[in-house]
Amino acid sequence: MALLIDIKHPDWMTDESMREQLLAYYPAADIRVGEAPGPLDEIDMLTVSSYYPGEASKYPNLRLIQKTGAGVNNILADEGLPEAIAVARLETGTSGAEMAEYALAYVLQEQRHMRQYHRQQARSEWRHYPPLQAADTRVAVLGLGRNGQLVARRFIDSGFRVTGWSRSPKRIDGVRCHAGGGELAEALADADYVVAVLPSTAETRGLFDAAQFSKFNPRAFFINLGRGDQVDEAGLIEALDSGLLAGAVLDVMSEEPLPPGSPLWLHPGVQLTPHVSGYHLGDAVADIAENYRRLQNGETLLHLVDRDLGY
Ligand code: NDP
């Protein structure tokens, strides 16, 4: 049986380059690429970055869909996906470290008033502002999974006060932890920056709407690295316009690529990036080859997703 790679983001990684990487780990594997899948009934494992509804139904003997990243919401949104098909994700320290670096970079930009200085430069204006100090600044990290914990750790190591929020209770050194919907307001109340690293699930979709933003610490700064469908974008603009939020950094949008007409593009309080905060897979690619090996040998698979929880 064969593994088919159909990533669908050649600007990020081509199927052929993924194939070469996987063959380096497992030279004997039967690995095919999207353009030349061969007989579809020979495919028992599919590796994707993007997934469209019904895609799995093309492969009658499919047993595993392997995501080349952490978020599996698009795969689980396929209502016709048979229960017998397992879904696995990747856990990559490399992209988690990149997400942490990204969040820290945007926070430091605010702490050191860099956007302000850039604007002043255009007016030849010489005026200083005291830097905001990490020890007096609280960062709330929403989502304390593989990536969220790396983000939280990066802020702790940089001297910030850190709050965390997850679905189930946690104890993490240096993090004031909260859990469950009932404790979200508490997690947000005194945060200067809110960094969301949440999966898209039935519980988190639409979580950040105008009502939720009104519970943020006034003038807090919002950074979303999780999924765009967690944010009601009209509610975000309302919160920015009414001064409830100091600004927002969005790496993920409800529709990607963001349509040219979206008001987010031109809003002065919004900074956008095209879903790049976590980018490189690093040695996590080995886990895709390992899952193929395990699938062929009937062994327990790595990083299986709980389809009921949605992550
Ligand atoms: P994990 O599955 O390891 O962790 C998810 C975290 O979210 C857990 O702490 C979980 O709680 C928490 N969570 C889930 N549902 C809720 C809820 N209803 N209320 C409170 N907390 C909740 O995911 P990762 O950390 O690996 O990644 C998180 C998300 O980041 C991915 O799903 C993906 O969407 C996004 N991502 C974005 C990237 C980018 O480049 N922008 C790159 C990689 C990931 P608990 O611990 O209790 O289970």
Image (spheres, grey):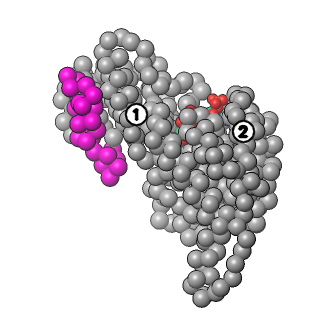
> Spatial distance from mark 1 to mark 2, Cα to Cα?
27 Å
Q: Position of residue 292 (x, y in %)?
A: 32, 22
Q: Residue at x 60, y 46 (%)?
A: 154
Tell me if residue 13 is in the magenta stretch: yes
Look at 61% across and 38% down and name the residue there.
149
Residue type, mark 2 in image: Val
> Within the magenta stretch, is there residue 278?
no
Q: Position of residue 160 (x, y in %)?
A: 70, 50
The answer to whether 192 appears left or right of 110 in the picture is right
Q: Which mark is residue 143?
A: none
| Residue 135: image location, x then y, percent | 74, 53
Amino acid under disc 1: Ala
Do the numbered discs 1 and 2 sit on residues whose CB atoms are within 8 Å?
no
Q: Which residues are magenta?
A: 8-34
Q: Is residue 293 above or below residue 100?
A: above
Which residue is identified by label 2? 175
Q: Is residue 247 visible?
A: yes
Would the CB of label 1 be found within 8 Å of ligand 1? no
Residue 268 falls left or right of residue 298: right
- Residue position marked by numbered label 1 in the rendering: 284
Determine crowd level at label 2: few under 14, some 14-19, many 20+ residues with C-alpha closer than 10 A: many
